[in-house]
Amino acid sequence: MSETIFGAVFLLLVFIGTITIAYAIMFKLLVPKRKYDYYIVLPSNTCSEELTKAVYAAKTKIDLLGDSGYGKVIVVDMGMTQAQKLSCLNICRQTNGIYLIESEQIKELF
């Protein structure tokens, strides 16, 4: 009876170890060797609450991935009023890695 229990526990531990090694190898293969700069571009014609949530969500994802030095969030002004621009600039000043640019400047970026 006890041999069966010990055998089952041993097989379970071997199975868990095999799965863990497989995931570690796959993770090592899928993670790039060198990180490159990348941009998350959000076009907007208003600085609404939805845009604010999207910008902060994108920045949070970049930070959670550990890419805060490589990833940047760019909000493209597609016809905001002056008050909306000031609101978006306030968001950009509060957080590093979030930028507001004009639609004409997007060509210079790429």
Image: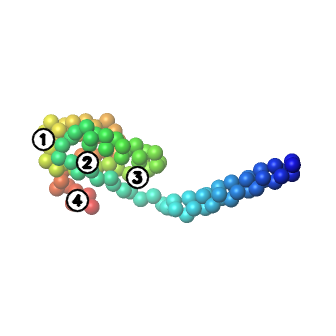
Secondary structure of residue under mark 1: loop
Kindly identify the amino acid type of the residue bearing the numbered disc 2. Answer: Val
Q: CA distance from mark 4 to mark 3?
A: 19 Å
Q: At which x and y percent is residue 17? A: 70, 55
Residue at the bottom extreme of this rendering? 29
Closer to viewer: mark 3 or mark 1: 1
The answer for how far apart the CA atoms under marks 4 and 1 are is 23 Å
Give the left or right position of residue 35, taking residue 26 as reference: left
Residue tagged 1: 81
Against 34, residue 53 (above or below) is above
Q: CA distance from mark 2 to mark 3?
A: 17 Å
Q: Residue at x 18, y 53 (%)?
A: 103
The alpha-carbon separation of the residues under discs 2 and 4 comes to 15 Å
Q: Nearer the viewer, mark 2 or mark 4?
A: 2
On screen, residue 94 above or below 36: above
Q: Which label number is shown at residue 108? A: 4
Query: Where does label 2 land, which residue?
Result: 75
Q: Which amino acid, mark 1? A: Thr
